[in-house]
Amino acid sequence: MHLTRDEERLLADGTPAEQLSMKILATLGDVYGADRLIPITGAHISGASPKTLGDAGVEFLEGFATTARVRVRTTVNPTGMDPDRWRDFGVPEAAIRTQERIVAAYAAMGVEPTFSCTPYQIGHRPKRGEHIAWAESSAVVFANAVLGARTNREGGPSALAAAVVGRTPNFGLHLEENRKATHAFDVRVPMRGYRWSLLGLHLGELVGDGVPYLRGCNATEDEIKAFGAALASAGAVGMFHVEGLTPEWREARADGLPARTVTEADLLAARDRYTTGTEPEAIGLGSPQLSADELRAVADLLEKHRPRPRVFAFTSRAARAEAVDAARRIEALGHVVFVDTCLEVSPMELWASTTATPSGKGAIYLPTLCGQRVVLDDLQELLRRFS
Amino acid sequence: MILTGRRIVAGRAEGSVLASGRPLSLLGGVDSATGEVRDPESPICGESVAGRVLALPHAKGSTVGSYVLYGLRKREVAPAAIVVRRAETILAVGAVLAGVPMVDGVPTDLLRTGDRAVVDATRGAIEVPLVHERPVVSCFLEREGRILVVRRSEKVGSYQGKWSGISGFLEGSEDPEDRAFREIEEETGLTEVSRIARGPALLSRGGDTVYRINPFRFHAPRGDVRLDWENVEYRWVNPSELATLDGVPKLVAVYQATIP
């Protein structure tokens, strides 16, 4: 990969963190055949909870932070706990200390303390055509597909390196030709709410790292958020198109592709495949974190139904501030609204061994990250069934 | 044997190979304090990566796995070098963070756990001094849509009792095609044969030998097969039957290499 004189200088004479960041970007550029580094307008980093970083990651970040400063707007993923509430929920003191070290390291680098997996819903919303370096697979797929911004599926360390340099290697989804549809689907079933999660699980398994193109459906932003999150967890997907909805569908060149039909049976099979439990002790919402709209809808539903399991709703600090009334209504019913963390990086294992959720992404990660059995279904259906 | 690939992270290291035919997840799959592989689905579960030449197809799982390599290095239990078939973000970034020499584009299926290997990642070369390469020919004779396979006798040096094409070692700087004609005549008595195709060479590991297999396909329109001591049985089979035979390694792949 070609480096400019300024990039060469950073590699040779930058701070230790800058040199290491350049080395990471240059190596990835070579691995994937990039011709050069391109400037980015923003970065989003994953790896902010003790669970996803591990001890080694925390040690690395602390050392790195002493000579690192981000050069572009940079936001960061959820932490492992709500800093104001952990005491009441049995989170061990040692985990809090580790969390504080992580938060301090990101703060020292100039990263905005958003602690959200939905940066695009709280003001970090790049525009069509902007090159960015985002980690967090659900945010990556949203940025590419829904916003038309351009990012590869970065890992935590590579997004951090890009933030410190302000550049990223030019390959993959930064290039027009890799954003075209590879698989086409006719969606012949009614699509709303959590069914988008099921569709994401189903298609993710079918397309691997391809670019699916959907016909015959429409969605709200929160539905498409849930779809993308499930799609990007079940497969290594970084981009999709929905005909008539997402900004690049006209350029997706899906016309020549044989279309596969999505049926009701496909969706039900996805639900059943990820349902591993029967009697939930908790209902988990917010993978990705709930938007202000979703918080309000949850509050309305909970006032109608009175589920036996406690509801744990995860959202960003910004979304809670926007819908603070809804958050209060949910908590007044004995349920919980956590901020700065999300369903699967929180210690759900302290509070339940079976969790019900309408989230496809949650259904994938709750078993491995939180040791949960899962009941996957529509929220209203869950509230009815377990009241 | 010397394998070559592409430098990912420069450096030089020597060690005992730890080879897995399956991708490995670093986060959750390797104990970050000891370097022990804990993933029960990994064929190298229970082994330690510390000081080893880690040979994998590629990594899988969370991208935060890169930090695990860094942690292993800090505790001095990192691999001495990493060789992979295909580099991806997790291992490439991890090797940079940890300063572990790394090479990709390597046919890692030719490496075995316990091989001593010298990795010169700067040049992209992996030398395995105790494993030697031997060139061989493997020939499929074709008659009326069927191909001839023979079952190796107990007297041959390798793969006794296995089904195979007509095969033999090359001697000196001999031309593979000359050797092919000679082996066919010796092992089948057939002399009226003409070459249809020659495929690209394939490598196959057996014990401390790596066979460089030169695949051939010949037309053998007539004549009775007379076996010599090297084989005990022969059959004319449909190409599709090859996969069902108890054959030598890569039997099907070698045949397929002769199909243009």
Image (spheres, coloured by chain):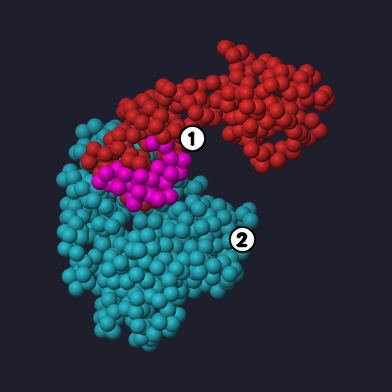
Chain colours: A cyan, B red
Query: Is label 1 or label 2 in front?
Result: 1
Residue A260 is labelled as 2
Q: Which amino acid does label 1 sit on?
A: Asp
Please identify the residue farthest to the bottom as the structure is shown.
A304
| Residue A37 visible to the viewer | no
What is the chain letter for disc 2?
A
Q: Which residue is drawn at 44% across and 62% down?
A: A230
Residue B59 is labelled as none
Q: Which residue is drawn at 67% across and 15% down?
A: B178
List the residue tagged with mark 1: B109
Asked if residue B140 lies left or right of residue B79, the reply is right
Q: Is the magenta stretch mostly helix, strand or loop?
A: loop
| Residue B42 visible to the viewer | yes
Q: Is mark 2 on a helix, strand or loop?
A: strand
Label 2: how many Cα within 10 Å (few below 14, some 14–19, many 20+) = few
Residue A372 picture location, percent across and down: 37, 66
* Nearer to the camera, A171 or A378: A378
Q: In which quarter of the image is residue A259?
A: bottom right
Asked if residue A177 lies left or right of residue B53, the reply is right
* Nearer to the camera, A211 or A262: A262
Q: Does the magenta stretch include residue B31?
A: yes
Residue B160 picture location, percent across and down: 61, 29
Asked if residue A237 lies left or right of residue A351, the reply is right
What is the chain letter for disc 1?
B
Residue at mark 1 to residue at mark 2: CA–CA distance? 36 Å
Q: How many tags in the picture?
A: 2
Residue B241 picture location, percent across and down: 70, 40
Q: What residue range appears in magenta?
A: B18-46
